Amino acid sequence: ALGHWGGPDELARELAEAHAVPPDALEPADDPEAYQRASAGLRDAYGQGHAIYATGQLDATIAMLEAATYKKEKPHKSPYDVGSQARLREVLATWFEEGDPLAWPLLAVDGLRPATAFERRNKVRTPRSWTPTPDPLTQWADASYAAACAHQRLRIVRFRHEALAFVRAGVARYRAETGRTTHDDLVADLDAALDRPAAVATLARRYRLGVVDEFQDTDARQYAIFARIFRATATSGLF
């Protein structure tokens, strides 16, 4: 999942922004049941691919791909540069022998798909009428790739939520140990205090109208606080 971000700094920036959002408002929402269903399906697909690999089919598939002479005029911009088929075989063989059934090498699996193979063929030496020879491994890749991509998206969402929970817990420990409070902490504390209906009712009676200046600087949690107070009754309003 970490590969989704360009590096630790990019992940840190996203978590810092997400920390200002209430956990139940973070989009997309985590769906543990959907993730478990997708994981079960992906394990089954991995088992099917592994059974095909165990027959020795990978060598025949790679030979078929090599026969198409996949080398573009600018090979440095394509996975199919000189020696790429050998690397493709190495990646897939290592994964089938030792890999995680839920951590698919998506680029390698995509490289086995007929549509990808056709797009990346050498257009000078390989005619447009060329098509990959159907075999069990290319058919398996074609049938499984979409599910693997969908699972990867769910996995990224899970990681984001789990990482944010870790950050929140760390911030809470830091606050407890040091007694320090930041501006974001004040907003979060107010949001938590408004979970008490009596607190919302008291503020709504005292302040009937709310006007938000510099609205572009208002984040999701701050807006949720304003909405809870100034939309609590039919006579209140938020502008």
Image (cartoon, rainbow, N blue to C red):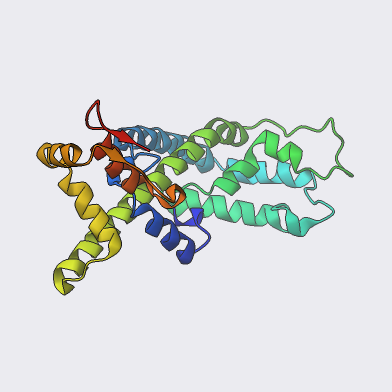
> Which quadrant is home to the C terminus?
top left
Q: Residue at x 55, y 46 (%)?
A: 106
The image quarter containing residue 164 is bottom left
Query: 140 or 31: which is nearer to us?
Result: 31
Instruction: Residue 167: give x, y in percent of width and height.
Output: 29, 60
Vertical relation: 124 (above or below) 73? above
Residue 94 vs residue 159: left or right?
right
Note whether 202 is above or below 76 in the view shown: above
Residue 82 visible in the shown view: no
Left/right placement of residue 227 relative to residue 71 reads left
Q: Position of residue 75 (x, y in %)?
A: 78, 56
* Percent position of residue 63, x then y: 71, 45
Q: Is residue 210 left or right of residue 27?
A: left
Measured from the top left, where is residue 27 in percent x and y? Answer: 39, 41
Question: Which residue occupies the extreme right position in the image?
Answer: 124
Query: How many labels were placed on the picture?
Result: 0
Residue 23 in view: yes
Residue closest to the eye, 94 or 167: 167
Q: Nearer the viewer, residue 79 or 207?
A: 207
Q: Residue furthest left?
A: 198
Q: Residue at x 75, y 39 (%)?
A: 119
In the displayed orientation, state which residue is furthest to the bottom. Answer: 178
Q: Residue at x 64, y 32 (%)?
A: 135
141 or 22: nearer the eye? 22
